[in-house]
Image (cartoon, rainbow, N blue to C red):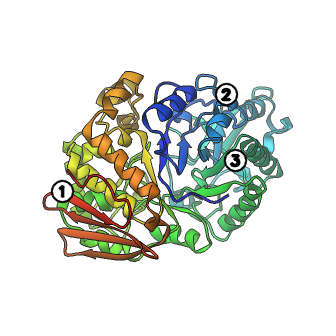
Amino acid sequence: MQVKNKVQLITYPDSLGGDLNALEHVLEQHFPDTFMGGIHILPPFPSSGDRGFAPLTYLEIDPAFGTWEDVRRLGKKYDLLLDLMVNHISAKSEYFLDFLENGQDSSYADLFLSIEKLWPDGSPSREEIEKIFLRRKEPYSDFTIKSTGEKVRVWTTFGKMTPSEQIDLDINSDATRQLLSDFFANFGENHVRIVRLDAVAYVTKKPGTSCFFIEPEIYQFLEWLTDLAEKHDIVLLPEVHAHYSVQNKLSERGYWIYDFILPYLVLETIIHRDATKLGNYLKDRPAKQFTMLDCHDGVPIKPDLNDLYDSAEARKIVDICLERGSNLSLIFSPKHQDADGFDVHQVRGTYYSMLGCDDDAYLVARAIQFFTPGVPQVYYVGLLAGENDQEAVDKSGEGREINRHNYTFEEIEQAVNQEVVQRLIKLIHFRNRHPAFDGEMTAVETDGETFSIRWENGTEYAELRVDLGSYQFEVFSSGEGIDQNSR
């Protein structure tokens, strides 16, 4: 399986019309030949929470979204990317429910990471806990085995509830390896071509460490997964939010990685109208990346951009986004905050709103993304130039819902008819079809306010020239060009 160097769509299974069948209809009606790179369908599996990221199983599709037949039908038209939360599974899964009923007599008991597997006395010290890259107050949850009344403590990296609804898997157990093998076999049978390994850096637990991306154990696990995926013609995309040097280690080993640095740098570039930092970054980054500006979470800052930002300048950007309606996800662990207290993990909001709902600024951002080496992904809200959905935040109490609006057919029709969306579609088509992007990026030039990126492939070329002072851009190219500039 070769990943296509074309634009991909990211969407929930129910966000464009209501289910997978509606998604197919919307793509055919409004976006024919637009997402030639494929579709990333955010978790369509039965789930107990976190909008699909607390899956009960990967062997079923939630009936509210459709069936595996819908997935296979989409897979015949598009390369499909699905998530595998390799670190955890739902507390309401049949596997964990059986464990809660029968304890160590459960055939699924060894799937889970009881605290005794790491600390035989079941009691990690406070010092050891403070070293862990925590996502909640404690890295574990307490449960009671129904048949015996025994109290058990199992590892739970994620989850807002106590006890957590997301139970970590013991990736070193034979039971977990078999379960993962079953999941991959099912993906392969249903035309899934790329699997994003969500939260994969958290799978390595080791006393006395951060329990995050522990070497060499993480590479050993990824090598096993790679062999498994290749048997089913599947490509892996590890998802790791960490210092960029960690991402680079994966890239050096040949893995696809996410460019989680680009979204903030583009935001900063456009708000400050200065491309100096962005230009320097683009000259020295791995090319084998998936690029994005927006997603179902937010624009990353810490830890992805550690050592790449000035906290005082970052506060200014964050404050502007907050003024425009965004909200924040913060770093929980004090040891992983900046010395001056800066603790922003992600800025949550639509990218269009973060840029002040300015059509020209937004299209400049997308043009820069599409000319950056890598496979571009466009989140469905960004595709439709969606604005912050504060009503959804107020209703749910979940800050991430600000950028997770579910569109009706009527709303999609209205959004598609916006000039900004039509211009974006033209940019996508140009990025998909021009042969220069199958060559190399040959030049990045900037004097701060002006910025250019050039691609060449033999005699074919495509060059983006941006004036940040006016948020205007032009594309110069060989052959069939783009039928719009910034106007």
Q: CA distance from mark 1 to mark 3?
A: 48 Å
Q: Which of marks 3 and 2 precedes in the sequence?
A: 2
Residue type, numbered disc 2: Thr
Horizontally, is 483 left or right of 158 in the view? left
For the point 69% across and 30% down, the residue is: 69
Q: Nearer the viewer, mark 1 or mark 3?
A: 1
Where residue 368 sits: x, y (%)? Answer: 33, 61
Neighbor class of circle 3 (other Cα within 10 Å; few <14, some 14-19, many 20+) is many
Q: Quadrant of residue 201?
A: bottom right
Image vertical order of residue 342 relative to residue 135, above or below: below
Q: Quadrant of residue 262?
A: bottom left
- Can you identify the residue that label 3 sits on? 169
Residue type, numbered disc 3: Leu
SS label for mark 3: loop
Image vertical order of residue 1 relative to residue 295, above or below: below
Q: Which of marks 3 and 1 precedes in the sequence?
A: 3
Image vertical order of residue 466 relative to residue 120, above or below: below
For the point 41% across and 35% down, the residue is: 404
- Can you identify the residue that label 1 sits on? 471
For the point 77% across and 48% down, the residue is: 176
Q: Nearer the viewer, mark 2 or mark 3?
A: 2
Q: Which of marks 2 and 1 precedes in the sequence?
A: 2
Q: Is residue 331 visible in the rendered structure shown here? A: no
Horizontally, is 157 left or right of 399 in the view? right
- Can you identify the residue that label 2 sits on? 67
**Closer to us: 255 or 37:** 37
Residue type, numbered disc 1: Tyr
Where residue 93 sits: x, y (%)? Answer: 70, 32
Where residue 251 sits: x, y (%)? Answer: 56, 70
Where residue 470 sits: x, y (%)? Answer: 13, 58
Q: Which dot marks residue 138?
A: none
Residues at circles 1 and 3 in contact by the CB criterion of under 8 Å: no
